[in-house]
Image (spheres, rainbow, N blue to C red):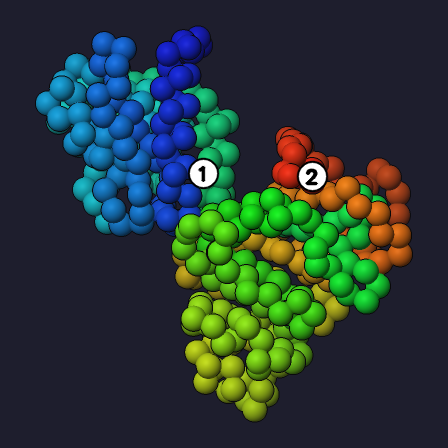
């Protein structure tokens, strides 16, 4: 078993991961994969999986390398697939190329692969190296890995707050707590997510578009939690070009309130039974799984943030902390039922970065 990783292996794997991330938001529910073909210390071909159903990274890179790939090394962040899906097995193309060595970041947990690609490479006499930058590879495809391992979507909880923890004034005014740079970053998060979720209060107060605008990328689904189904029919998300990718979850079964939404092309899902008579968040997850949506970006407000934290389904939080003081206002998080410090929710893998004048805190829940 290999224990030492060379600087060369790190460098080319980092390159493969950077290439993979170029397709962020475009490959779901498939993983992001990048590949680099190296011969005699020189890159002779590279590629990445650009979109769901399109050629895989290994095929893209090997096609660019051509016949020069014989005897070369292939760096790829995920084990080559060994089954027929939208495309033929990548591992067969790798073997046919004549590469002598394959360096991989992560084993693919998909039961259709999960070591089968590695075995085929070994049986073909190709040296295989596994676990080069495995943590980086895992983070790159964290939504895919969770979905495959648990059958549930990866949930990111995001909000912007003042330094004293407020997300709006007492009157509900929240524009703008975070900086323009942070708002642009939020659009990158939306581009990467399969769906974006807010509560009906956010729609009523802010009338958001919940679209990808400040960066290029596909439009995610928009999910609204509306227990009473009192969303305004003139709301932007019910009348724009993306209303057919909008779903409202409600406990209201009154056809007179449901039919006007459906007439606009908006999907309405009944999901009663949650805590305190509110929306059952498990129903949202099941709907996402049914539609092969593997990542969810929850954007709040306070009631939704608190409900998701209480539910225990959140994987990661991303909080933009603005250098502003508000004093009295609306707290970001409500009552989580915690009465002693020994029960507080602990974070792990916490990181910080500046985004304009704001600080972005990123952390995973234990």
Residue 340, placed above or below residue 172: above
Q: Quadrant of residue 12?
A: top left
Which part of the image, by quadrant, shows the N terminus?
top left
Q: Residue furthest left?
A: 67
* Disc 2 to disc 1: CB gap under 8 Å: no
Q: Nearer the viewer, residue 160 or 125?
A: 160
Foreground mark, 2 or 1, reads 2
Q: Mark 2 sits on what residue?
A: 357
Q: Quadrant of residue 318?
A: top right
Q: Mark 1 sits on what residue?
A: 141
Q: Nearer the viewer, residue 303 or 231?
A: 231
For numbered disc 2, what is the local secondary structure?
loop
Horizontal arrangement in the rendering, residue 298 relative to residue 295 (left or right): right
Residue 174 visible somewhere in the drawing: yes
- Residue at horizontal 80 percent and vertical 52 percent from the top: 166
Gap in angstroms between the C-alphas marked 2 and 1? 29 Å
Q: Position of residue 144 (x, y in %)?
A: 44, 43
């Amino acid at each position: 078993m290999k224990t030492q990783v060379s600087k060369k292996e790190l460098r080319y794997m980092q390159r493969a991961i950077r290439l993979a991330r170029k397709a962020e938001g475009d490959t779901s529910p498939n993983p992001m994969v990048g590949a680099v073909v190296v011969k005699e210390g020189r890159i002779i071909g590279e590629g990445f999986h650009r979109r769901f159903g399109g050629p895989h990274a290994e095929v893209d890179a090997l096609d660019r390398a051509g016949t020069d790939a014989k005897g070369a090394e292939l760096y790829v962040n995920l084990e080559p697939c060994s089954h027929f899906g939208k495309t033929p097995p990548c591992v067969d193309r790798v073997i046919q190329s004549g590469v002598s060595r394959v360096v991989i970041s992560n084993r693919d947990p998909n039961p259709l692969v999960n070591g089968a690609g590695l075995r085929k490479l070994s049986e073909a006499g190709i040296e295989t190296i596994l676990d080069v930058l495995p943590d980086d590879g895992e983070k790159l495809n964290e939504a895919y890995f969770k979905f495959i391992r648990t059958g549930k979507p990866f949930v990111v909880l995001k909000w912007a707050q003042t330094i004293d923890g407020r997300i709006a004034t007492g009157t509900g005014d929240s524009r703008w707590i975070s900086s323009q740079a942070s708002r642009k970053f939020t659009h990158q998060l939306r581009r990467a997510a399969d769906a974006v979720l807010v509560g009906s209060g956010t729609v009523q107060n802010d009338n958001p578009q919940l679209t990808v605008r400040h960066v290029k990328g596909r439009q995610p689904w928009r999910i609204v939690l509306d227990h009473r189904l009192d969303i305004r029919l003139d709301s932007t998300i019910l009348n724009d070009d993306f209303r057919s990718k909008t779903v409202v979850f409600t406990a209201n079964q009154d056809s007179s309130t449901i039919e006007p939404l459906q007439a606009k092309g908006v999907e309405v899902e009944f999901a009663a039974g949650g805590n305190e008579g509110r929306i059952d968040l498990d129903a949202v997850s099941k709907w996402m799984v049914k539609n092969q949506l593997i990542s969810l970006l929850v954007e709040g407000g306070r009631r939704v943030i608190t409900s998701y934290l209480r539910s225990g389904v959140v994987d990661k939080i991303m909080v933009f902390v603005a250098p502003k003081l508000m004093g009295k206002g609306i707290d970001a998080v409500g009552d989580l039922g915690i009465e002693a410090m020994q029960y507080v929710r602990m974070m792990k893998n916490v990181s910080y970065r500046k985004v304009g004048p704001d600080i972005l805190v990123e952390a995973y829940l234990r």
